[in-house]
Amino acid sequence: MTNSFAHKLTSGQSVVTAECLPPRSGDREAVKRLSAALPESLDAIVVSDTSREIHGSSLGCAALLAQQKRTTIVTMLTRDRNRVALENDALAAATLGVNGILSLSGDHQLLGTNPQAAGAYDIDSIQFTKALKDMTRGLDLEGRSIDPKPELLVGAVVQPYLQPSELNLICLKKKVAAGADFLLTQAVFDLAGFAQWLSLVRAAGIDRKTAIIASVLPLTSVEKANRLKDQKSCGPIGEGVIARLAGSADPAQEGVAMATEIAGQLKGIPGVRGIHILSGGCESLTSEVMKGAGLV
């Protein structure tokens, strides 16, 4: 695999990635506009597999971005697909020019806008991570040969603030043992807590076995901050963060400023191999964070 993201991962260089949300439409041109909104200097675009509401296909969006010569990582939720569908989509991703897959369990459907939807839950994200790694070695889940084998990077998600820390490290080690080439963290707001977790990760030697990419999220309103805080879908959001948003004349710009500050500090922490910018559908904010944090 010869793309910039893969080269930097294997050579130990730092990377900058960003999330994008597939358009909530069937408009092919919307994907082109999405690509134009994201800086060309990104090492990879991680296409979200929307877990809470209906949007366009993550695989379809990633494939169209690949046609725009963008390096793409497609997110796949094990919640919505059984093992057959997951492996089928993984092969399709490789065929369509997608560069990697981010394995994720996904939020329970009761937390989304379609609580009546049934979940698959055939295999979990760790099992899928291992299955993906085995596929890149030429074997499917049943041990049957795949020829030619797909060229895909394999990623997983980690939660730095999950307690107790001992169980957190066990889960992390399982994802690395399963074959994760890179790990994206939850959005970081509590730098002290993140640094404490990362010191345990370094002590265990995990940072030498995979690339840990720390995520930042530009909050756009107090309402969004409170919603994320209640959902616990990112790292802890302190009262200081919410007060800073509430006291600003332009909360969205204040959110960008905070994400920029956090990214600038994260990139200097030993063990952090890159920064991932979570846009939450506000892809235009990515370039502002990158410029402000010196990530361009």
Image: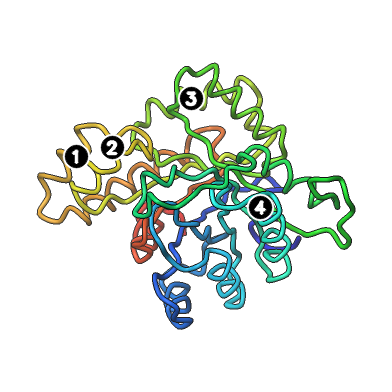
Name the residue that disc number 2 marks: 229
Q: Secondary structure at mark 1?
A: helix
**Left or right of 175, for residue 238:** left
User: Sequence-wise, which precedes: disc 4 or disc 1?
Assistant: 4
Q: Which residue is mark 3?
A: 197
Q: Position of residue 99 (x, y in %)?
A: 67, 61
Q: What secondary structure is found at the residue carrying circle 4?
A: helix
Upstream in sequence: badge 3 or badge 4? 4
CB-based contact (under 8 Å), mark 4 and mark 1: no
Disc 4 target residue: 8
Q: Nearer the viewer, residue 93 or 72?
A: 93
Alpha carbon separation for disc pair 2 and 4: 34 Å
Please identify, in this view, whether the residue under mark 2 or under mark 4 is nearer the observer.
2
Residue under label 1: 242
Secondary structure at numbered mark 3: helix
Q: Earlier in the sequence, mark 1 or mark 2?
A: 2
Disc 1 to disc 2: CB gap under 8 Å: yes
How crowded is the residue under tag 3: few (<14 C-alpha within 10 Å), some, or many (20+)? some
Residue pictured at 72% horizontal, 40% vertical: 179
Q: State which tag comes first along the sequence, 2 or 4.
A: 4
